[in-house]
Amino acid sequence: MVPLAPSLQPFFWTAILDSAHLDAPPIVIASRESRLALWQATHIRDRLRERYPQRAVSILGMTTRGDQIVDRPLSMIGGKGLFIKELEVAMQQGRADLAVHSMKDVPMEMPEGFVLAAFSARENPADAFVSSRYASIDELPAGAIVGTSSLRRAAILGASHPRLRIRSLRGNLDTRLRKLDAGEYDAILLAAAGLIRLGLGERIRSVLSVEQSLPAPGQGVLAIEVPVGRPDLLELLAPLNDPDSAHCVRAERAFSRALGGSCQVPLAAHALLDNGTLWLRGLVATPDGRRMIAGELRGPAPDDEAIGHSLAETLRRRGAGEIIEQLLSTGVS
């Protein structure tokens, strides 16, 4: 075989790689049918199409039990897993190959038979203050009604602004904004990332700093879930993985998992990576925010999960364990 000229070699190998996907089966992404979930799935679909132009990629829209039951808090109906169970069934049955999730909505314990294959670069991880009448939380009058579906946000808000009334708010992002606009709430708290992704950044009146409201584990990151035993998918998705986000998310989730993090426990964790050093902050609180145990830890990025475990144990010894045991034993939500 005559060697190719160096200038032609990249084109040759690209052609070989592209032709390898010509007869490959299509990639099907399972997604909830909310506007934000479909945006997330479309974002990953487009990245895959860009990376593998010869490979067909499509989206299978589905409705989950979490979408159907909107009149009760998640902690009362089974937790965040209700948003992904139907998607996992579709993967088990071979109707879909992967699913895209907002990382903060993924249960801390992955169900048997599934693995998180890739993490996106992080969008703004902060909580956003949204109101039609007020520019910030500090402007709200005593007794103002603030809506949130998050025990974490409710606890932090209760600790810093006890004069406000916090009311449960369920439904997809558009539903929550509609309830706000209808006057059911004076303000609502949402993840800034979702608003930004849907082009609704103008609805954000102010962004709460990490110091004001420590985010949920994984907030702002998209995760791609695949069935175990699909090395072909792991290989395809590897270029989409953001290593910095992966380190931060692993630390945050290890912290939460070590403390038995669930929808019944107001828990926050947020990590930053700077020149190879990972800085993890975490907290556990009572639902009313009257008691809050917080701490932080730094260490090398490759030790991400160990850092999460270590900070969790530190907080457990300082009283977080007592809070969690009481909440789980009484079923307080």
Image (tube, rainbow, N blue to C red):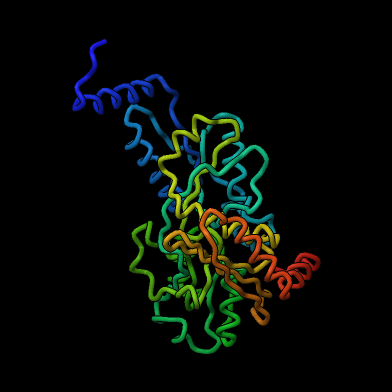
Tell me: 195 left or right of 147: left
Q: Which image quadrant: the N terminus?
A: top left
Tell me: 169 left or right of 59: right
Residue 39, x across and y down, in percent: 40, 49
Q: Does 3 sit above or below residue 317?
A: above
Q: Does 112 sit above or below residue 166?
A: above
Residue 140, x across and y down, in percent: 47, 85
Q: Which image quadrant: the C terminus?
A: bottom right
**Residue at the image point whose x is 68% and y is 66% from the top:** 265
Tell me: 9 left or right of 292: left
Q: How many numbered marks, from 0 up? A: 0
**Residue at the image point whose x is 63% and y is 66% from the top:** 311
Residue 51, x across and y down, in percent: 34, 36
Comparing 187 with 157, the one in front is: 157
**Residue at the image point whose x is 66% and y is 57% from the top:** 257
**Residue at the image point whose x is 46% and y is 61% from the top:** 273
Q: Does 260 sit above or below residue 330?
A: above
User: Residue 134's image quarter?
Assistant: bottom left
Q: Does 249 sit above or below residue 325?
A: above
Comparing 210 with 101, the one in front is: 210
Furthest residue to the right?
Answer: 329
Residue 324, x across and y down, in percent: 73, 68
